[in-house]
Amino acid sequence: SAVISQKPSRDICQRGTSLTIQCQVDSQVTMMFWYRQQPGQSLTLIATANQGSEATYESGFVIDKFPISRPNLTFSTLTVSNMSPEDSSIYLCSAGSGIEKLFFGSGTQLSVL
Amino acid sequence: DAKTTQPTSMDCAEGRAANLPCNHSTISGNEYVYWYRQIHSQGPQYIIHGLKNNETNEMASLIITEDRKSSTLILPHATLRDTAVYYCIVRGKNDYKLSFGAGTTVTVRA
């Protein structure tokens, strides 16, 4: 199994600012993903964080708004840029090696005022 | 487009078996059925997965019908800590991504 730590666990931000969320895995993993969970909703995949190359974004998500880095096999960041109240959500990091199972962090609860 | 259909919610009695249904009538031959759950304020947790045979682990059992168009997750002895949203997900053999539907909100009552 993999243990995933996310920082910060929660934050309150002002409109127009940016927040970078960190995801640290306790072992090397092949795949890392970022999800968004809006209030009362299910999880929506934002992007696949690719090690050493640009992230692969899902429909409706763009790099300018959600830049992602993945410098190595255990770490990734997601930045929420130029935030608005509509960005208030829980952001979750997911990781795994192989097809069998993915592990999730506890999420970052973001509130934008 | 949703690949699975689950009831919105269900209640279970503590100590009894909880049977969670899932319909996946368009599943293809190389797609697996996965179950995850999300307890309040936590990230999703893997429970079990299967292709066509029934599977059992320390958490649950997965029963897949012979035609693979539906499945049932069984929690053998539900406890209050099993209260969560349960997601049934169809995932391709070479597809690392998970696509979450609305899930079933399961409430275990004392």
Image (cartoon, coloured by chain):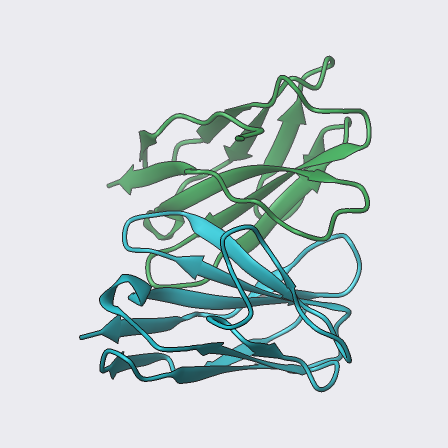
Asked whether the viewer can see residue A13, the reply is yes
Asked whether the viewer can see residue A7, the reply is no
Near-viewer residue (B34 or B80): B34
- Residue in the picture at 24% in, 41% down: B110
Near-viewer residue (B9 or B13): B9
The chain drawn in green is B
Which corner quadrant of the image does residue B3 belong to? top right
The chain drawn in cyan is A
Q: Quadrant of the N terminus of chain A?
A: bottom right
| Name of the residue lying farthest toward the top | B67
- Residue in the picture at 67% in, 23% down: B64
Question: Where B84 falls versus B51 (above or below)?
Answer: below
Which corner quadrant of the image does residue A18 belong to? bottom left
In the displayed structure, does residue B10 sit left or right of residue A22? left
Which corner quadrant of the image does residue B52 belong to? top right
- Residue in the picture at 77% in, 80% down: A52
In the displayed structure, does residue A60 sit left or right of residue A32? left
Count every numbered label the image shows and give the total: 0
Near-viewer residue (B14 or A5): A5
In the rendered image, residue A55, in percent from the top left (x then y), is placed at 66, 69
| Name of the residue lying farthest toward the left | A113
Q: Quadrant of the C terminus of chain A?
A: bottom left
In the rendered image, residue B71, in percent from the top left (x then y), is placed at 60, 24
Question: Where B76 falls versus A53 (above or below)?
Answer: above
Question: Where A61 falls versus A10 (above or below)?
Answer: above
In the rendered image, residue A22, in percent from the top left (x then y), is placed at 51, 83
In the rendered image, residue B42, in percent from the top left (x then y), is placed at 40, 63
